[in-house]
Image (cartoon, grey):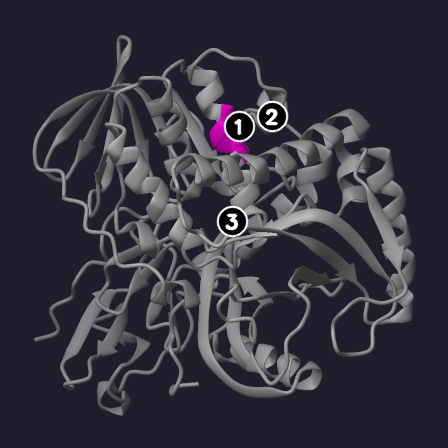
């Protein structure tokens, strides 16, 4: 797929942001760490309440999960309605799902209020089966939807041009361009008095009296409240890291020779596939996602893209595949986000772990934390609380994940690695044993070799090479670095250590 653009389709629609790097000490009412949809929405809502708000982002706004998402806005639950009801009860399930619907309305209203041109459109959604055995699951989800007051109808078909069995139709869902929305919201935020600083990484924070002191590499921020909205947040008071699992999801942009109905589509496969048209202007371009896997569990992401390509070719008359990209997201142990005050603190809040529902759960969680800061009631507070305990639900998944971490933490240290740097081709990387340590070795396009310690700067797990993404991926907690060792995705806050091999 080297002839195609290895970037999201949305990058063609919006210019890159260019907010300054923070270089001076500042004060504010609230500081937000993380410039994705949850962080920026929380910042905007507090700004509307006349708070002096500062947002810092370690990279740029277009480098996060939001910009790499597919822009599906729906009130379906990634892990199924029936499971949500079973695990949390009817009342909580109804609260969660209607909060997702309210999140779509919030996005719609903010886009209208601030004249954000993001191709937002209300459309239908279809959950469908491609095999007879999953018809029962469709029927069960229909019954569970009615229990939580979500209107759906069972269809014997849907508009997609290939054989299906039953489908579940959802009305009043939506799609948009996530990057156009994000950059438009950033513009509205700064026009309303908010401040954004890109390429600014939080190193640590300290609560002192009724303030929070946030330290970056070049400055200090004194804030009344701190909102941690960067996926994974190690706060010292609560470590949510063992309860979240890093995943990669893959997307291709498919140019088909005919249009499909403008709707959202997702199937019952595990992992499931999801499809939509790219935009009102590109109705023949399909955005197809799926083939998810645990970060660092495969040596190369190329297989996932090939699987999506095969999936598309089997179902559509494909003319070309001009785009492909992947995005990292985090699943929680019990399937719901962590959003709210850090236990024991009245000044630090966290937003994390939206699974495959980041745009809606991220917006709903942002509304929740802004309400908490403003001392407003919100029915999600107890359900999304970072201190909640769902042992029976989370323990099997937690035990499996701990085993996965131990496997990589120990096993990757005794693996027999390649030791011949000369075998590396330009723009390739590999793990090698050099001077009795495991190293991450990369050869750039000019043939220059770059050598780093392969130990992740978070907790020391051995990173894995992903040549297709040009990244070093930590299989333990999801940290990702570019080929030169710079952090792409946290929790690590520092680059891989360079190793001198002379």
Q: Which residue is mark 3?
A: 330
- The picture places residue 439, in percent across and down from the top left corner, at 27, 69
- Circle 2 SS class: loop
Which residue is found at the position 25% from the left and 35% from the top? 190
Any part of residue 235 in sight: no
Q: Could you tell me if the residues under marks 1 and 2 are in contact, i.e. CB atoms within 8 Å? A: yes
Is residue 370 in the magenta section? no
Which residue is found at the position 58% from the left and 21% from the top? 381
Which residue is found at the position 46% from the left and 34% from the top? 351
Q: Which residue is mark 1?
A: 386
When asked about the image quadrant of residue 127, the answer is bottom right
Query: Magenta residues, as a range?
Result: 364-368
When asked about the image quadrant of residue 486, the answer is bottom left
- The picture places residue 42, in percent across and down from the top left corner, at 41, 30
- The picture places residue 234, in percent across and down from the top left corner, at 38, 35
Tell me if mark 1 has few (under 14), some (14-19) or many (20+) residues whose alpha carbon lies within 10 angstroms of its own. Answer: many
Q: State the separation of the CA atoms marked 2 and 3.
A: 18 Å
When asked about the image quadrant of residue 318, the answer is bottom right
User: Which circle marks residue 388 in the picture?
Assistant: 2
Is residue 365 in the magenta section? yes
| Sequence order check, earlier mark of 2 and 3 | 3
Q: Is residue 446 above or below residue 198?
A: below
Position of residue 198 in the picture relative to residue 355 (left or right): left
Q: Is residue 173 above or below residue 288?
A: above
**Mostly what secondary structure, the magenta segment?**
helix
Any part of residue 106 in sight: yes
Q: Nearer the viewer, residue 278 or 91?
A: 278
Q: Nearer the viewer, residue 477 or 104?
A: 104
Q: Nearer the viewer, residue 251 or 316?
A: 316
Q: Nearer the viewer, residue 426 or 459?
A: 426
């Amino acid at each position: 797929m080297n002839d195609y653009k290895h970037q999201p389709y949305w990058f063609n629609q919006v210019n890159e942001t260019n907010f300054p790097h923070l270089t001076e000490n500042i004060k504010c009412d609230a500081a937000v760490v993380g410039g994705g949809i949850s962080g920026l929405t929380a910042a905007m809502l507090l700004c509307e309440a006349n708070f002096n708000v500062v947002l810092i982002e370690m990279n740029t706004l277009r480098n996060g999960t939001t910009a790499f998402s597919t822009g599906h806005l729906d009130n379906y639950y990634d892990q199924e309605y029936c499971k949500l009801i079973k695990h949390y009860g009817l009342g909580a399930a109804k609260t969660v799902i209607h909060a997702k619907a309210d999140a779509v309305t919030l996005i719609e209203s903010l886009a209208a209020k601030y004249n954000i041109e993001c191709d937002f459109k209300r459309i239908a959604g279809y959950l469908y089966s491609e095999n007879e055995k999953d018809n029962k699951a469709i029927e069960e989800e229909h019954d569970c939807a009615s229990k939580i007051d979500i209107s759906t109808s069972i269809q014997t078909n849907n508009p997609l041009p290939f054989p299906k069995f039953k489908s579940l139709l959802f009305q009043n869902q939506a799609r948009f361009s996530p990057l156009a929305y994000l950059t438009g919201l950033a513009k509205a935020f700064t026009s309303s008095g908010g401040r954004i600083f890109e390429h600014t990484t939080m190193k640590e924070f300290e609560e002192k009296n009724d303030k929070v002191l946030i330290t970056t590499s070049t400055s200090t921020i004194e804030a009344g409240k701190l909102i941690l909205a960067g996926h994974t947040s190690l706060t010292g008071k609560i470590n949510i890291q063992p309860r979240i699992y890093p995943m990669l999801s893959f997307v291709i942009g498919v140019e088909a020779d005919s249009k499909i109905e403008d709707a959202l589509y997702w199937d019952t496969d595990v992992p499931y596939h999801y499809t939509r048209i790219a935009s009102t202007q590109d109705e023949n371009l399909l955005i197809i996602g799926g083939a998810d896997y645990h970060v660092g569990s495969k040596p190369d992401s190329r297989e996932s893209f090939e699987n999506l390509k095969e999936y598309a070719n089997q179902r559509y008359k494909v003319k070309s595949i001009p785009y492909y990209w992947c995005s990292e997201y985090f699943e929680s142990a019990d399937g719901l986000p962590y959003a709210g005050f850090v236990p024991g603190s009245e000044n630090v809040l966290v937003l994390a772990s939206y699974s495959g529902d980041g745009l809606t759960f991220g917006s709903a969680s942002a509304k929740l934390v802004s309400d908490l800061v403003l001392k407003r009631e919100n029915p999600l507070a107890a359900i999304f609380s970072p201190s909640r305990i769902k042992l029976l639900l989370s323990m099997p998944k937690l035990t499996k994940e701990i085993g996965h971490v131990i496997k990589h933490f120990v096993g990757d240290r005794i693996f027999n690695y390649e030791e011949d740097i000369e075998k590396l081709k330009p723009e390739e990387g590999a793990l090698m044993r050099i001077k009795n340590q495991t190293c991450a070795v990369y050869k750039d396009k000019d043939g220059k070799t770059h050598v780093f310690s392969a130990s992740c700067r978070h907790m020391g797990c051995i990173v894995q090479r992903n040549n297709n993404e040009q990244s070093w991926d930590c299989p333990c907690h999801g940290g990702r670095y570019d080929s030169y060792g710079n952090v792409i995705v946290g929790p690590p806050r520092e680059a891989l250590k360079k190793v001198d091999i002379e």
